[in-house]
Image (cartoon, rainbow, N blue to C red):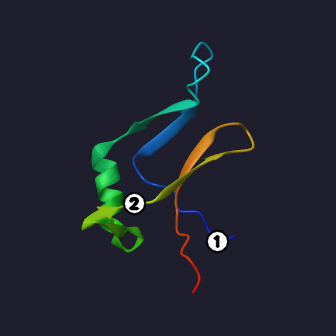
C-alpha cells in the first residue's frame, strides 16, 4: 500500500450523537489552507472536462474517526 497523502485544509469528524441516521459525519474546509495544498501539490490534480480536480478517498479509521486522503489510483495498462 502506498503512503497516504492527507489533504490540507479539510477535516472530517464522526457524526454527532443526536444526528439523524442518514448523517455519517461532518467536516470543515479551511479555504486558504485547501487552496495552498492544491497550489503546492499540482502533481496530484487531475483534469475533467478542462477543470482541475483533486480526487479523494474518505476512510474510517480504527478509532471510528474519518480521514480524507488523496486518491492516487490509476488504471494499469
- Could you tell me which residue is drawn at 57 percent across and 87 percent down? 77
Q: Is residue 54 left or right of residue 11?
A: left
Proximity of marks 2 and 1: CB atoms separated by less than 8 Å: no
41 relative to 30, above or below:
below
72 relative to 63, above or below:
below
Identify the residue position indicated by label 1 in the image.
2
Tell me how far mark 2 sits from mark 1, CA to CA: 17 Å
Q: Secondary structure at mark 1?
A: loop
56 relative to 39, above or below:
above
Q: Nearer the viewer, residue 76 or 57?
A: 76
- Could you tell me which residue is drawn at 29 percent across and 54 percent down? 35
* Sequence-first tag of 2 and 1: 1
- The 10 Å Cα crowd at callout 1, few under 14, some 14 to 19, many 20 or more, is few
Q: Is residue 3 left or right of residue 69?
A: right
Quadrant in which residue 30 is drawn: top left
Which label was assigned to residue 54? 2
Q: Secondary structure at mark 2?
A: loop
**How many numbered circles are shown?**
2
Amino acid at each position: 500500500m502506498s503512503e497516504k497523502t492527507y489533504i490540507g485544509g479539510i477535516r472530517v469528524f464522526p457524526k454527532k450523537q443526536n444526528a439523524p441516521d442518514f448523517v455519517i459525519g461532518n467536516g470543515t474546509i479551511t479555504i486558504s489552507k485547501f487552496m495552498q495544498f492544491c497550489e503546492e501539490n499540482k502533481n496530484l490534480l487531475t483534469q475533467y472536462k478542462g477543470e482541475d480536480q483533486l480526487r479523494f478517498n474518505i476512510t474510517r479509521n480504527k478509532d471510528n474517526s474519518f480521514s480524507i486522503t488523496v486518491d492516487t489510483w490509476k488504471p494499469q495498462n
